[in-house]
Image (cartoon, grey):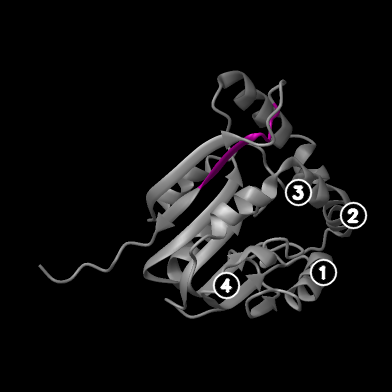
Amino acid sequence: MTRPIRPHPLFARFYAAFAGPALEKAGITEHRRRLLAGLTGEVIEIGAGNGLNFPHYPPGVTRLVAVEPEPNLRRLAQRAARDAPVPVEVESARAERLPFPDASFDAAVACLTLCSIAAPAAALAELHRVLRPGGQLRFFEHVQAGTPVIRGVQRALDATVWPRLMGGCHTGRDTQAALTAAGFTLTDVDRFDFPEARIPMPAAAHILGTAVRPEVSGPA
């Protein structure tokens, strides 16, 4: 059973007014461009937020369906869609239950959203379902840290206050393993810290890359 959509108005305002601009100042635009470069055809983006990716979609995208369950962020995304360089449809839905037929899209995008989805395995299963065979999933996510000490900090945060303060965000999910478990084939993974800092931060470890829904095998 899918949980009902719950608004997070305080976090939505915080993200739109402070967190989003802070990430842009730290240099996230370069990563957004890398994430979306070369996409073509019909694309779905889950957790589109207030539409910060929209300006960076390449002209080869003929249709972008942007899914955002949080109503305050969705309203901002609808405004951003008016100035996007590609056609954008902003939809209210949860990634765990996408209202689209099987094999509907050529590509999918998950950008800084799998950390906050209540059931990430279900969301990845849905993305696998709505992608056409051979379709790409582009991902840019903060993930489980590479050192035991920081992973311990992540576990402590995720078990206490962090998800409540940050709109459901979890700092230590092993998204790379989850992609493989969902049936995707990883074709490119870049692991790095963002933003770079002298002191290790619990949400600094990121991965950016491409996974593919395998082509359907023919009869032997």
* Mark toward the start of the polypeptide (1 vs 4): 1
> Where does residue 132 sit, x and y in percent of width and height?
39, 73
Q: Which mark is residue 76?
A: 1
- Along the viewing direction, whichever of 4 and 182 lies nearer the viewer: 182
Whether label 1 touches label 4, CB < 8 Å = no
Q: Secondary structure at mark 1?
A: helix
Q: Report, in whole angstroms, how far the alpha carbon at label 4 lies from the one at label 2.
A: 25 Å
Could you classify mark 1 by the number of other residues whose Cα lies within 10 Å: few (under 14), some (14-19), or many (20 or more)?
some
Can residue 159 be seen from the camera position used here? no
Magenta-tinted stretch: 201-208
Which one is closest to the eye, mark 2 or mark 1? 1
Question: On the picture, is 110 further left or further right than 178?
Answer: right
The amino acid at mark 3 is: Glu
* Mark toward the start of the polypeptide (2 vs 1): 2
Which one is closest to the eye, mark 4 or mark 3? 3
Q: Report, in whole angstroms, how far the alpha carbon at label 2 lies from the one at label 1.
A: 14 Å
Query: Which residue corresponds to mark 2?
Result: 10
Could you classify mark 4 by the number of other residues whose Cα lies within 10 Å: few (under 14), some (14-19), or many (20 or more)?
some
Residue 132 painted magenta: no
Q: Residue at x 69, y 66 (%)?
A: 55
The amino acid at mark 4 is: Leu
Q: Report, in whole angstroms, how far the alpha carbon at label 4 lies from the one at label 3.
A: 29 Å
- For residue 76, what is the image quadrant? bottom right
Query: Which residue corresponds to mark 4?
Result: 98
Q: Secondary structure at mark 4?
A: loop
